[in-house]
Amino acid sequence: MKKSWREKLENSKDLPRLEKISEKMSKRWGTGTIVIPAPMEVNEIMRKVPKGKLITINEIRLALAKKHGATTCCPMTTGIFAWIAANAVEEQKRKGEKEITPYWCTLKSGGVINEKYPGGVEGQELLLEKERAQSSSKRSKVCSC
C-alpha cells in the first residue's frame, strides 16, 4: 500500500545523521561534517515561519547545520523533505485540518519560488499574496526576502 505524505514526513529513516564530508564532496563543501536531517526537522523549521515572512532552503540548512554542530546540511535531502512537507500539508487540508505548515513561505535558494510545490508557482504566489508576502514579479519566480 502506498504511504501517505504524512507517513513519509513522519518516517525518520534513522535520521538525522552526521557524516564526515567525503573527499568527493569536499570539492563543493570543503572539509568537516554534513548533517542529513530528518524530514520532521525540516518541517518544524518551515512551520515556525511567522505569517507574512519568508525563509529559504539555505536558511533552513544553516539552522540545521548549527543545531547539529555540522559544517553544512545536505541540500538534496533538505529540499526533498520540504517538498514532502508541502504535499503533507495539502493532504491535511483535504482532511479539513487547520494547523498546517505554511510551506509556501519556504523558497528555494536565492528566493526562487519552488515550482515543484503543490499548485506550482501560481498556486504558491496566490498563497503568498494571501499572507501579504510580496513576490517581486509574477513570472520571474523570484521573491525579495
Image (cartoon, rainbow, N blue to C red):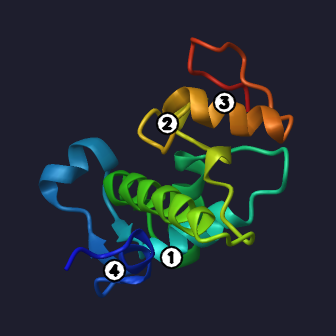
Q: Which numbered disc, 1 or 3, marks the residue closer to the eye? A: 3
Badge 3, how many Cα within 10 Å: few under 14, some, many 20+?
many
* Residue 68 seen in the figure: yes
The residue labelled by disc 3 is 125
* Residue 66 seen in the figure: no
Q: Residue at x 34, y 77 (%)?
A: 18
Q: Residue at x 74, y 65 (%)?
A: 48
- In which quarter of the view is residue 135 placed? top right
Which image quarter holds the N terminus?
Answer: bottom left
Q: Earlier in the sequence, mark 3 or mark 4?
A: 4
The residue labelled by disc 1 is 40
Report the residue that reaches farthest toward the left.
Answer: 24
Residue 32 percent across, percent down from the top left: 34, 64
Question: Which of these two is toward me, 91 or 68?
Answer: 91
Left/right placement of residue 141 relative to residue 31 reads right
The residue labelled by disc 4 is 17
The residue labelled by disc 2 is 114
Q: Which numbered disc, 3 or 2, marks the residue closer to the eye? A: 3
**Disc 3 to disc 2, C-alpha distance:** 10 Å
- In which quarter of the view is residue 37 placed? bottom left
Q: Residue at x 79, y 32 (%)?
A: 129
